[in-house]
Amino acid sequence: EVQLVESGGGLVQPGGSLRLSCAASGFTFSRYWMTWVRQAPGKGLEWVAHVKPDGSETYYVDSAEGRFTISRDNAKDSLYLQMSSLRAEDTAVYYCVRHTDWSFDYWGQGTLVTVSS
Amino acid sequence: QSALTQPPSASGSPGQSVTISCTGTSSDVGGYNHVSWYQQHPGKAPKLMIYEVTKRPSGVPDRFSGSKSGNTASLTVSGLQAEDEADYYCASFAGSRQWVFGTGTKVTVL
């Protein structure tokens, strides 16, 4: 059974940093593109970042470019999102998502990040 | 990277059909057959319902179907059931390894 379990969310002050983690199991993690998608409270979904199976290529939504870094450790079956210079508008539930067949087929339950003073 | 446009709400009685539209541009929906649809119940993670415009993952009822014409994709739910009441989001590849989601549609079963 595919499982994606996020951790690392919490309350952080504007301008601060946070690192999200996602532990994957039930599939060969190193073969899949992985993605972070976020959802602000009461709002829609937003694609945030994407990483190639070997970690050699990364892509970001414009608002995350230069502030967020997606990475992975295939030896640990883990995905990460390092977030810095956080803003109030980054407040959201962050989902770890597996990408395949040009879609997002498995989602974690999400971890809440709140940016507030 | 503007969000794809969906109607805020749609509704139907049990057994009826409801169709949700997802309008983008020639740079996303119209340019690729990489449109997918997601169902999200309150407090839950989204679930993949349709991928590659028309394909259904294993386990998704055949009451759910997808289509596309030009820059607009559509999701149709036939034979509406109470459990279909949820938020639905489309998503599309937008080139250069970028992805964009729709604004979301709340489906109510009357």
Image (tube, rainbow, N blue to C red):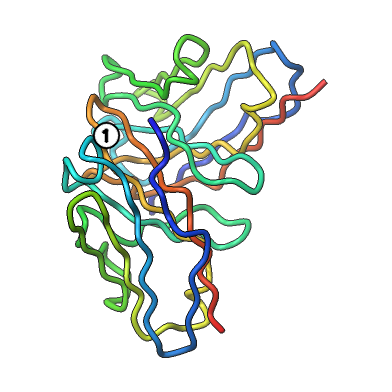
- The image shows residue B73 at horizontal and vertical percentages of 27, 57
Q: At 26% from the left edge and 54% from the top edge, which residue is drawn?
A: B72
In-image side of A62 versus B56 (left or right): right
Q: Quadrant of residue A117?
A: top right
In-image side of B11 versus A72 (left or right): right
Q: Neighbour class for label 1 at 10 Å: few (<14), some, many (≥20)?
A: many
Residue B56 or A75: which is nearer the viewer?
B56
Residue B90 or A34: which is nearer the viewer?
B90
- The image shows residue B7 at horizontal and vertical percentages of 46, 59
Q: At 20% from the left edge and 39% from the top edge, which residue is drawn?
A: B26
Chain letter for mark 1, please. Answer: B
The N terminus of chain B lies in which quarter of the figure? Answer: top left
Tell me if residue B36 comes above or below residue B98 in the rendering: below
Residue furthest bottom as drawn: B15
- The image shows residue A30 at horizontal and vertical percentages of 28, 30
Residue B3 or A98: which is nearer the viewer?
B3
The C terminus of chain B lies in which quarter of the figure? Answer: bottom right
- The image shows residue B77 at horizontal and vertical percentages of 36, 75
Q: At 76% from the left edge and 17% from the top edge, which residue is drawn?
A: A13
Helix, strand or loop at mark 1: loop
Q: Quadrant of residue B80?
A: bottom left
Q: How many marks?
A: 1
Tell me if residue A85 comes above or below residue A34 in the rendering: above
Tell me if residue A25 comes above or below residue B6 in the rendering: above
The amino acid type, in three-letter code, at marker 1 is Ala
Q: Which residue is mark 1?
A: B94
In-image side of B44 versus A79 (left or right): right
Q: At 56% from the left edge and 41% from the top edge, which residue is drawn?
A: A39
